[in-house]
Amino acid sequence: MWRWAERVLGPDPETVGEDIDPRFSLANERTFLAWIRTALALISIGLAVTQLLPPFDLPGGRRIIGIPLMVLGIVVAVQALREWLGNERAMRQGRRLPRPRLSAAVTVVIATIGVVALIISLAAGST
């Protein structure tokens, strides 16, 4: 029978590796889906910031905050798939899991966007 992992990872048994405990594969999938929800939220918030917030005193201020959020959402979605695949391959081949990079990247970008938003808000409040 044809399995999802074989479809994604390839039909060669050496590439796919051994079957693993379904609990591990399902946990990997739940993590992937959590990242996809995060990506969807980032894209939605970025769109809401650019379209629904009242204009700032700074021209393009909404876009300075919203567009990086949308870009981050796209990057998170793509990287979540890459991490899911890497984890699935590693588990099936009995290797250590690759280091997760997504959490640190998302934290840095969101913190940076937060600082920029704070600066824009403080600058608008002083005029």
Image (tube, rainbow, N blue to C red):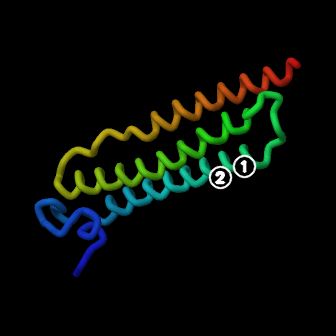
Q: Residues within 10 Å of mark 2 (few under 14, many from 20)?
A: some
Q: Residue furthest top?
A: 126
* Image side of residue 65 versus residue 55, left or right: left
Q: Hey, what amino acid is under mark 1? A: Ala
- 75, above or below 114, in the image: below
Q: Which residue is mark 2?
A: 44
Residue occupying image coordinates x 59% and y 38%: 68
Q: Position of residue 60 (x, y in %)?
A: 73, 34
* Image side of residue 44 versus residue 74, left or right: right
Q: Residue furthest bottom?
A: 1
Residue occupying image coordinates x 24% and y 78%: 2
Q: Quadrant of residue 121?
A: top right
Q: Are marks 1 and 2 in contact (CB under 8 Å)?
A: yes
The quadrant the N terminus occupies is: bottom left
Whole-number angstrom distance, CA of label 1 to CA of label 2:
6 Å
* Residue 48 disc label: 1
* Residue 121 disc label: none
Front-lying residue, 125 or 88: 125
Q: Residue furthest right?
A: 127
Numbered disc 2: secondary structure: helix
The quadrant the C terminus occupies is: top right
Q: Position of residue 113 (x, y in %)?
A: 62, 31
Residue occupying image coordinates x 82% and y 38%: 55
Q: Residue furthest left?
A: 14
- 16, above or below 64, in the image: below
Front-lying residue, 93 or 126: 126
Q: Position of residue 38 (x, y in %)?
A: 55, 50
* Image side of residue 66 versus residue 82, left or right: right
